[in-house]
Amino acid sequence: MTETTMAISKNIETRFSDGVTLDERTGYEGYIVEADKLIEFATALRDEFGYDFLSSVTGVDYLPEEKMEVVYHMYKSTGGGALIFKVQVPRQAPVVPSLYDVFLGADFQEREAWDLLGIKFEGHPDLRRILMWEGFEGHPLRKDWKEAFHENDTKPFDARWPGGDVYRAEDENPFTKNVLYPEGFDPEKWTPEGETAVYAGMTEIESDDPMHTDQIVVNLGPQHPSTHGVFRMVATLDGETIVKLRPVMGYLHRNHEKIGERNTYLMNIPFTDRLDYLSSMTANWGYVQAVEKLLGPKVVVPERAEYIRVIMSEFTRIANHLMAIGALLNDLGAYFTPMLYALTERELILDIFEAAAGSRMMCNYFRFGGLVRDLPAGVEQKMRDLAFERLPRKIDELDRYLTENEIVVVRCEGIGVLTPEEAIGYSAVGPVLRASGVPYDVRKADPYGIYDRFDFDVAVAYHGDVYDRYLVRLEEIRQSIRILQQALDDLPEGEIMMGKPKYSIRVPAGEAYGRVEAPKGELGFYVVSDGSANPWRYHVRAPSFINLTGLSKMCEGDKVADAVIILGSIDIVLGETDR
Amino acid sequence: MSEDINSQGYDVPPEMQNVVAITTLDKIYNWGRRYSVWPMMFGLACCAIEMICTAASRFDFSRFGMEIMRPSPRQADLMLVSGTVTKKMVPQIVRLYNQMPEPKYVVAMGACASGGGPFKEGYNVVSGIDKFLPVDVYIPGCPPTPQALLFGLMRVQEMIDNQSLKEVRWYQKGDLPAIPIPILGPDLIDPRDYPEFAEKLAKAQAVVAEPEEV
Ligand code: SF4
């Protein structure tokens, strides 16, 4: 604890004499708050202590103790470390007051905890399932919930060819499919209920328009060319204007967390690649950082590895933003040409990843305590060529073609506005937050790795609209190039891994939250270890997911065609949104 | 060009070569189709990004006549299932497939679409699109590189080459049956399972009751 956090914790303890206790389990930190004190506590943190940013809300199922725990991570939007607090409720009837009225950013995250863990948030206005469909049986992240293809609680599994003959999971299931039904279930008597819940409350919305026109409900997605994957929006329109919009997701829910809790620690790294598949390096880093925190100070990442981590992350950021800008222009109707320009540069960056990691997209490059392998010969020169020569030129070119383009300006300015207060309230992160005038960047606010050694600025803009988000991304590419140039100049020789690479590691019991500034914003991994070879809880705080909380707010009052570019300006990746 | 479509054994006089070709109806029909496959613009997951790269500057599958990607299934011939098929999404995918006009082809791109891939054990994951749709070409990889995808697409072209007007399913008598749309129940329900549903369910419950037997 630093001095300031110590002072704050003193104050918190005096302010809340009862109902709030220190979390004294070894390896844990923060406070345990009584459920009935929660709203008061959170409000005080926001109004009196300056913790105005609710970053992450998630639940943990402590099955052996018959408890459910909800974990909150709060930050100050001016920077600094986390304040963690938890609420513990009995597992049989887990009910926790909702923080929806204090922090709008809790909206989707509480719905997710309800969906996957079955924790009820009292006072939440719309507590529906978010990733699974309405009507699904059970809450899959509970430790005693088993899926159809369940083989064993932990990996590695036993051999799949015990007697010399291979079997597949399907062979064990009479349906020869990955399905599981409750006892005595009769499908012909079943009435699906999903869609009614999605459309509920979307019709006949009050408006102060004196002219009474009929509203229509329009559905976009999940198969729609502008949704960047399988995202879906339901919008109520008055003429062309959006009166209400509701995001619907989960179409790419791939059960990362359930699978991650069965994997060993090392096995999860390739899965993090597949979260935000446009920027796997930063996702690697977030997870590795969380586990390194759990491992404690004995993990020392060698200098060279630290530099390469930064270099790879910044290349990732550039590749991601190129894609984001190209896709935004696609959404604006500039069918594919700007995208082709952007992708040309992205390909060159992917070449570097392929040379270093062996794969273009799914890099799987970071390891606990270093990196999997060193840069092969010649790659450093390639990187230098890109960072010093080609990219600065190409970014200027993109800037020249796009920034002043009349259509871009007219379509983007003043659209999808989020004020700074709203952005913080909705827990927006990354370029969305910074375009609203909040200069918050984890690399500066809470530096990790060796980011404190580099000279760079946090890109920030003040209108909070689509255009500013575009400008922030463009500027971030320039800042990344600056970091790259410094890092490449200083890149030392030496080891890239602490000690011998290990297949299976044991991690001391405890919790850790690792967060990095991924291209899309703060990406956090909350990992709880019970001392065994597999994480007890593995939660991803996904920027793409939480940034969508503000989507309805951004879209309301704008035209339906703008919803497409507003979504494009948030820059989501469905792998991470739905996990 | 004439070598491509000219049937062997028919000699075209030298002065007429490149102008006239003697060929079969099958050949000319397939030759037209193989160079104008319109894929559906539809991405499911990570593999879709490699699909975009294949369509973009460096790899450019318009060299194979595939540059027109159609977001509407009504205008597409080829469904590239590029990514993890989830239970929540599969009703939509089947619906899209049913909406595509014949002739239509399905390519399962990547480990996920072919068999569930790294997420196979997931409770919301379908172990491969071939549980619902007839797949013509499987492309391994996670993700398959653009080169692998191109190779897979060339396999589709070869498949087209070998089809015969007399035998293709879309010129047979009667309507082609649509694939029944799966239903989202307590878990995914495939209407094709209805006849033996109770029986299979009882069996599944028995397995759960005595896991040692497995
Ligand atoms: S096969 Fe691999 S890359 Fe393709 S969708 Fe599945 S996880 Fe993603």
Image: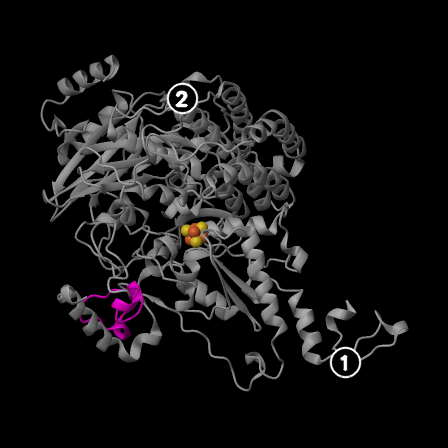
Q: How many marks?
A: 2
Which of labels 1 and 2 is toward the front? 1
**Position in image of residue A224 (x %, y %):** 51, 55
Q: Residue at x 76, y 75 (%)?
A: B6
* The label number, if any, that marks residue B9 in the structure image: 1
Left or right: where does residue A23 sit relative to residue A337? Answer: left
Q: Residue at x 46, y 22 (%)?
A: A493
Q: Give the Cα distance between marks 1 and 2.
A: 71 Å
Q: Amino acid at mark 1?
A: Gly
What secondary structure predominates along the stretch shown in magenta? loop
Secondary structure under the numbered disc 2 in the rendered image = helix
Q: Which residue is mark 2?
A: A303
Left or right: where does residue A521 sit relative to residue B15? Answer: left
Can residue A188 be found in the magenta stretch? yes
Tag 2: Cα neighbours inside 10 Å, few (<14), some, or many (≥20)?
A: some
Quadrant holding the N terminus of chain A: top left
Secondary structure under the numbered disc 1 in the rendered image = loop
Tell me which segment is drawn in magenta. Answer: A165-191
Can residue A350 be found in the magenta stretch? no
Q: In the image, is residue A151 above or below residue B179?
A: above
* Residue B76 appears in view: no
Left or right: where does residue B65 sit relative to residue A282? Answer: right
**Position in image of residue B136 (x %, y %):** 51, 68
Q: Is the CB atom of the residue marked by disc 2 within 8 angstroms of ligand 1's nearest atom?
A: no
Q: Residue at x 23, y 58 (%)?
A: A151
Q: Amino acid at mark 2?
A: Glu
Image color mode: one colour
